[in-house]
Every structure is written in structure tokens, then in C-alpha cells.
Image: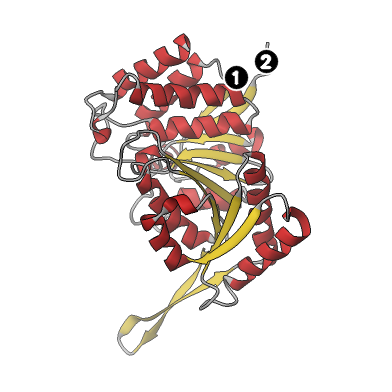
Amino acid sequence: MSTRIPATLIAGDGIGPEIMDATLAALDALEAPFDWDAQVAGLGGVKAAGDPLPQATLDSIRRTRLALKGPLETPSGGGYRSSNVRLREAFKLFANMRPAKTMIPGGRFDNIDLLVFRENVEGLYMGYEHYIPINDDPHAVAIATGVNTRQGARNILDYTFRTAIALGRKKVTVVHKANIMKALTGIFLETAYQMHKEKYAGRIELDDVIVDACCMKLVINPWQFDTLVTTNLFGDILSDLAAGLVGGLGMAPGANIGQDAAIFEAVHGSAPDIAGKGVANPIALMLAAALMLDHSGFHDKARRLRQAVSETLNADNIRTGDLGGRADTRAFTAAIVARIRNG
């Protein structure tokens, strides 16, 4: 019997509990050996503990070093910061990996297979910003400071090179704006070429592209890219653009990786407008669970889960409403589970 693996489970807000139940059903069918410690965050955390990221949730992740998370809503007002950002900071989750792969053929963009790596804790997302009042306008001037470090760049770049090589990828493209932000993104570009020369030359190709040109190229000819790596803000934007090439955020899983913890998530929002209606698409969270299985060494179970999703969508033609189908969450989940058990 395989060893059980402790893992933290955060169902999340809005449609989170529905898509988490669907994902757990698929993992149960796979006999995935996770021992779940259920915790709350987001609006659920505020209601339960007066904090969108309760101490008990942080303690659980520190203990398990592994978490599966649904979408979290940041409460408006009250000075609350994003729970997602706080989690990245608390566990130094320096790498965000977002695969974008075509699952339903025949769309405007077909045969897409991109990996986007985003530096996750530095850059313009560090929150070093303030206003300067002038006369009677308290917000007359807004100032934000971005911070990129050599070590931060090394962390995400080394993870990108190693992961891309392990997955059999051929080329890494650094996305930057070093023609204008010569220091802030120049340090990232410079470190990439240094690291490639020292450790990875001959093992994988490296090139670079300016971020605005990259956006255009992704829309005109996304097949020219293989693996993208970039700084925090650019990665946030480009990973959503890449998700749009394969059907939207409902198809987009994310992995947040650090030295001491890994958190896997559906990257879409909590969709409160459809919460409780039983129509949510659970694919993003299921694919995040597949990333979690890969991270934990269960590559065959990860492959079976992805295959079950693909066969349900394409061979069985069972799809939720956002993908042009008529299945509700429960029917779609039942079809996935049947594919796993019969596969």
C-alpha cells in the first residue's frame, strides 16, 4: 500500500466548493493517496476567523507543504490584502507555472502547447507604492517601486530551465522590457543568459523577446513559442493571454512552487454569479490536481486524469455550458469518473 501524503485542502469561495467536490471525486477514482486537511481562506476565512488567511490555514500548509486551492475572493474594504499574494509571500512561492494546452480541437487556435513561468514574489507586485498629496488633492501623485533581485531571478530561471528540460521542451524564451526598464527587467534578462551559458547551454535553446512584441506574436503565431519565462507583472498578463488561446481561464491550472511548499490552484475567479447553480466547469481545478499529482511523483495518475478530461470532452462530447455543452457540473464529473474507472 502506498504511503499517504498529507495535503491541505482549501475549497475556496463562490463556485470553489462545487469544483473542489468534482475534483475530489476524480482523485478518489484515481485512488490518489492524499490525506486532506480541510481549511478555509478568502471570504470563508473572514467568516470563520475574521481573517481571509487564518493562522490555522497557514499552520496546515507549513505542516503539509502541499495544498490544493479553489478560487478565493478578497473582501472589499477593511484593508484586506489578496490571500493569494499573502500565500506566495508566506511560503516564498517564487515560481508560478501555467500550462496552456489545447484540449478541444478545431478552435481559432489549435494544437497550442505553451508553458508560461512567472516570477511570483518580486517586481511591481511587492506593493511598495504610495501617494503624494498636492494642495487639496491627496492622490495627486502615485508612485510604485518595482524590485527584482539577482537571486529572485536565479530562483525562477533555474526552476524554469530544469522543468522545461525534464518535460522535453526545446526552447525557453525570456520576455522582458529591458529596452526601457533597463535595470528592473534588464537584471532578469542578463541573469537568464548568464545562467544558460553556465549550466544549460547545449541542453535547451534560449532566446528573448520584448513583452509588447510577444503579445502580438502570441496572437498572430503562438506556435513559434515553447516555454516563456518572465517577471511578475508580465507573467500575470501573458499567462491569461495564453489561457485565452485554449478556451479561457476555465481551462487554466496553476502551480505555485517554492523551496518549502507547493500550492496548486484553479486560476480563475470565484464566479459568485453562478455559485450554487451546479453549472461550473471544474476542468481548471482538475488540471491543477494533475499538476499536483505530477509534483508528488504520481505521473501515471496525472496522465490518466488528463486523458479522462480529454476523452470526456472529445470522445463523449460531454461539456459544460461555457464550452458549448449542456452538462451540469455533476454530470460532467460523473463522466470523468467513469472514464477514469473504465480506462
Using the image, determine if residue 160 lies above or below residue 321. Answer: below
Residue depicted at 39% across the width and 46% down the height: 243
Discs 1, 2 touching: Cβ within 8 Å: yes
In this rendered view, identify the residue nearer to me: 83 or 234. Answer: 234
Tell me where residue 311 appears, x and y as whole percent. Answer: 39, 22
- For the N terminus, the quadrant is top right
Number of labels in the image equals 2
Using the image, determine if residue 3 lies above or below residue 246. Answer: above
Type of residue at label 2?
Ser
**Distance of mark 1 from mark 2, alpha carbons?**
7 Å
Type of residue at label 1?
Pro
Q: Residues within 10 Å of mark 2 (few under 14, many from 20)?
A: few
Tell me where residue 105 appears, x and y as whole percent. Answer: 35, 34
Q: Which residue is mark 1?
A: 33
In this rendered view, identify the residue nearer to me: 197 or 154. Answer: 197
Tell me where residue 60 appears, x and y as whole percent. Answer: 59, 35
**In terms of secondary structure, where does tag 1 sit?**
loop
Q: In which image quadrant can residue 194 be found?
A: bottom right
Q: In which image quadrant can residue 146 be found?
A: bottom right
Residue depicted at 54% across the width and 38% down the height: 57
Tell me where residue 275 appears, x and y as whole percent. Answer: 27, 34
- Would you say 29 lies left or right of 76 here? right
Q: Which residue is mark 2?
A: 2
